[in-house]
Image (spheres, rainbow, N blue to C red):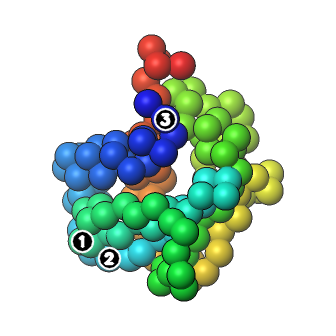
Amino acid sequence: MTLEERILLLLPERANSNEHLLWRGRHLSASVLLQVGAQDYLLRIREGRVAGVARGPFIMPNWQFALRADEHSWTQFWRALPPPGYNDLFAMAKAQRLRIEGDLYPLMSNLLYFKDLLASIRLSEGDQ
């Protein structure tokens, strides 16, 4: 499965079938820009559910915050056992592999939700 297929297909499926994740994000509605290399994806989250994932390019997209990293960094992050420095969003940000932009309030007030959401499409042990 390609990286794009995992984002477009697997992310909504895994997120919306995870009851704990849905409970954690039950008060969250936001639009998030996820940049993987040169490709943009717009995640629409409504009351904790991933309502949609759209592939860019976008003309003046509306989002609360953006997570931007190169394709190599996201590929490492989404491995079953990510190497040190790629295992967490803030580890990637500290190493300047990830840029976090925009209104950080939705991210910080729902931090565990977003960490679990993005980790939900990690490869399983046999897929590496």
- In this rendering, is residue 97 above or below 83? below
Counting labels gives: 3
Q: Position of residue 91 (x, y in %)?
A: 69, 49
The mark that comes first in sequence, 3 or 1, is 3
Disc 2/disc 1 C-alpha distance (Å): 5 Å
Location of residue 94 by image quarter = bottom right
The mark that comes first in sequence, 2 or 1, is 2
- In this rendering, is residue 12 above or below 5? below
Q: Amino acid at mark 1?
A: Glu
Q: Amino acid at mark 3?
A: Thr
Location of residue 66 by image quarter = bottom right
10 Å neighbourhood of mark 1: few (<14), some, or many (≥20)? some
Residue in the image at 26% along x and 46% along y:
13
Could you tell whether 20 is left or right of 64 in the image?
left
Could you tell whether 113 is left or right of 67 in the image?
left
Q: Which residue is mark 2?
A: 29
Query: Do residues under tags 2 and 1 come within 8 Å of each other at their CB atoms?
Result: yes
Residue in the image at 56% along x and 63% along y:
40
Tell me the number on the disc at residue 47.
1
Q: Is residue 111 visible?
A: no
For the residue labelled by badge 2, is the local secondary structure a helix, a strand or a loop?
strand
Residue in the image at 56% along x and 30% along y:
79
Q: Position of residue 121 (x, y in %)?
A: 42, 40
Could you tell whether 21 is left or right of 54 in the image?
left
Q: Which residue is mark 3?
A: 2
